[in-house]
Image (tube, helix red, strand yellow):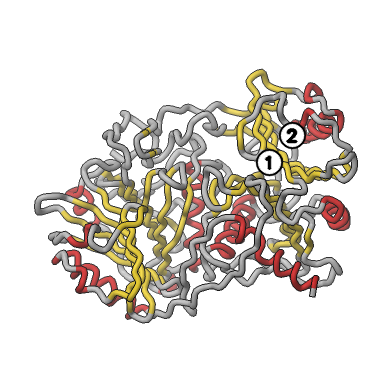
Amino acid sequence: MARAIMNTLTLLCCFVLGAALFGCSAHYADTGKTAAVETAPALEQTIGVVGEAAPAGQAGEQANPFAYTPPERVCSRAMLMEAAESYITAQEAGDISKMSLAPDAKFIEDMSAVTKEKGLWNTPLPIAHHKSIYDAARCKTFSEVIVTEGGHPYVIGTRLTVDKGKVVEIDSLVTDKEDWLFNAEDYLKYSKAEEWPVLPVDDRVGRQDLIDAANQYFDFIFMDKGIRPPWGSPCARLEGGMYTNAENEEKDTCRIPGPLGEMPVVNRTFVVDEEMGSVNVFCRFGNSRDGMPDSHTFRLVNGKYRWIHTLSVNLTGEPVDVPEYKPEPDCECDRAMLTAATDSYIAAQKTGDISKMALADKVKYMENMSETSKEKGLWNTPLPIAHHLSIYDTVRCKTFTEVIITEGEHQYVIGTRLKVDKGKVKEIDSLVTDKTDWLFNAEDYLKYSTAEDWPVLAPDDRISRQDLIDAGHQYFDFVFMDKGIRPPFGGIPCARLEGGAYTNPKNEEKDTCWIPAPLGELPIVNRTFVVDEEMGSVNVFCRFGDSENGMPDSHTFRLVDGKYKWIHTLSVNLSDEPLVVPENAPGVPK
């Protein structure tokens, strides 16, 4: 019984580490010889970045998204290995001077900035075991450090950022007895029993595959049962000290019967080592300000999970309680139900009469990512709709509809999602853009939208649900974080439509979607997906920068033969100030 209880706790994992918003779902190799040049993160900015046409916005505070020019970083695998070794030496001695630090080095502990003098690296620790991975594309390392003796056990996850042999940032997550499932003795026992050698070349997967595997894990457990993570056998998860395969059986014990609910896993950043088949993810559970800091390290062999290690920092000082979880029943829908729901939404919006929709007894109403009442939403205002386009997700019983209004007293471009169960609408979630918003021009949005072709795709031109979601992630991760990402650019033609500005107004036979990125680092958080395989489309709702008041955004991607074809974006300016677009800003459509 005790083992069953502990296995259940481990299974629930980080689901209970933040406030989950429960929804319903349907039934349904660097060799070390070459130096890499890295684009550095804009850590000093709250949400400022350079990059694509996606402004960083906060209510009452509008940072210039093009104000930051990132420096270049140069490193090799040998430099990274030397830096990680110096960190271990410094931690054992409690003497940070044993590391080669840049004069302006930054220090972070448990996702908060600290001074050089206050970090745990100043405390001598008898390290029992450690392992490291090295990301020469981004000039970063990750080291897992286990301390079982000396009076205070720890398990620590530390990242270093390196430039020309100098450490420019130390970023540690420190777990001890206050933290999730902590047991340093067991963490040591199980870690040492695992095999983490450099992989043979034939057993490796690419950088993109490793990052995709990490995103798929979080998205499946905390959002979408249509995700297909690369579960492997044998496989084990080590969480704080709890182990899913204590008997070392030849079976997959990593798999979790997700999703366990819906919870944002935000601020995901990656350290990737293709030679080790490993990717480390730093993230927060729940929100980007005080959500639980977490590290997940994945080891993949032949593209399948082999080991998963997690460290989660309890910031509250209180024991982590595991509440009883009772998931909502699955929503039930089919494509015909979803089509009827969107038709009723269009009729309601045209007349300003929401009673034209078949509403459930209890409905959640959202506008610009804030909850509102039935009576206050724009759906109560009659609007002369000039054009609309919808996609339908029968796995999650959701729809997305893009609505363009060019006539009447007020022009809008609106993106609305509906959640449907047994033909009844359970949630209406709208993003409403107008003249104060990013690159807004409803007439141009109408002109370019109606010139594009969005028919149902032939079966041979479609890709899977998983590939569509991966393409959404890859776009954001490339533009705003990691030059090693490989989004499926290359569709001919391809165009981005942002607020009304268009990258291909002459309709030339070329890819105008591509962006010369990344040009900085900006978290794109609270990503959720509506996926329509028949249309080759995925819509992403997200926020730029901050999970609570970052700029609400919608990106809709149309892919044909696995390549981006059309990309539509709507971004809501929450500030009272107009958005100023600098001349010749990279990635901004004219």
Residue 150 or residue 546, whichever sits in front:
150
Rendered position, 73 above or below 485:
above
Q: Position of residue 153 (x, y in %)?
A: 83, 44
Q: Residue at x 71, y 50 (%)?
A: 179
Task: Classify the position of the N terminus by image quarter.
Answer: bottom right
Q: Residue at x 24, y 41 (%)?
A: 436
Residue 443 or residue 553, whichever sits in front:
553
Q: Position of residue 115 (x, y in %)?
A: 66, 25
Mark 1 lies on residue = 135
Residue 80 marker: 2
Task: Check whether the beta carbons of the residues at disc 1 and disc 2 lie within 8 A of each other.
Answer: yes
Q: Position of residue 309 (x, y in %)?
A: 73, 54
Query: Where, by quadrant of the figure, is residue 194 drawn?
Result: bottom right
Q: Residue at x 74, y 61 (%)?
A: 237
Q: Residue at x 41, y 61 (%)?
A: 538
Sequence-wise, which precedes: disc 1 or disc 2?
2
Which residue type does callout 1 highlight? Asp
Task: Classify the position of the C terminus by image quarter.
Answer: top left
Residue 203 seen by the camera: no
Query: Where, by quadrant of the figure, is residue 535 drawn?
Result: bottom left
